[in-house]
Amino acid sequence: MKTASEIIGTAVKIGGVSVVLILVVTLSALIVSVEVCFALLMSWTTLLREKMMTAYDWIVLTFNRCATNVTTANLLKKGVDVEMMIEKIKKKLKI
């Protein structure tokens, strides 16, 4: 038969081992949870970057188109102005 001190010692050892095992399991679960959160964060960041690049490409395309239209219109107007100026010079030289 075990004495009271042996029973208490055994209970303390079992309790200590249980506490250590619970802490190890808890820390392992936390580490796995953090890794899953980082993986989700990375995938969301990648998805957001892809969406932003799509939006950025659309914005650049739109502004390039607008800039091209404006520039083309201005060049055509300047070309017409130059043609008119050349015609005026030709008329003045013929007179």
Image: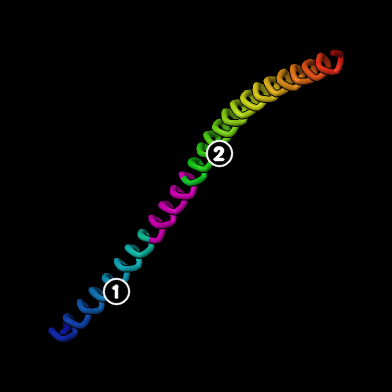
Residue at 15% in and 86% down: 5
Residue at 55% in and 38% down: 53
Rendered position, 34 above or below 45:
below
Amino acid at pointer 1: Val
Rendered position, 24 above or below 16:
above
Q: Which residue is mark 1?
A: 17
Q: Which residue sits furthest front?
A: 95
Left of 67 or right of it: where is 23? left
- Measured as percent of width and height from the top left, residue 61 is found at 60, 30
Residue at 29% in and 74% down: 17
Q: Which residue is mark 2?
A: 53
Q: Quadrant of residue 75?
A: top right
Prevalent SS, magenta region:
helix
Left of 82 or right of it: where is 29? left
Dot in front, 1 or 2: 2
Residue 47 inside the magenta-drawn segment: no
Along the viewing direction, whichever of 56 and 17 lies nearer the viewer = 56
Rendered position, 53 above or below 28:
above
Left of 18 or right of it: where is 95? right
Along the viewing direction, whichever of 92 and 35 lies nearer the viewer = 92
Q: How is the image coloured?
A: rainbow
Mark 1, secondary structure of its residue: helix
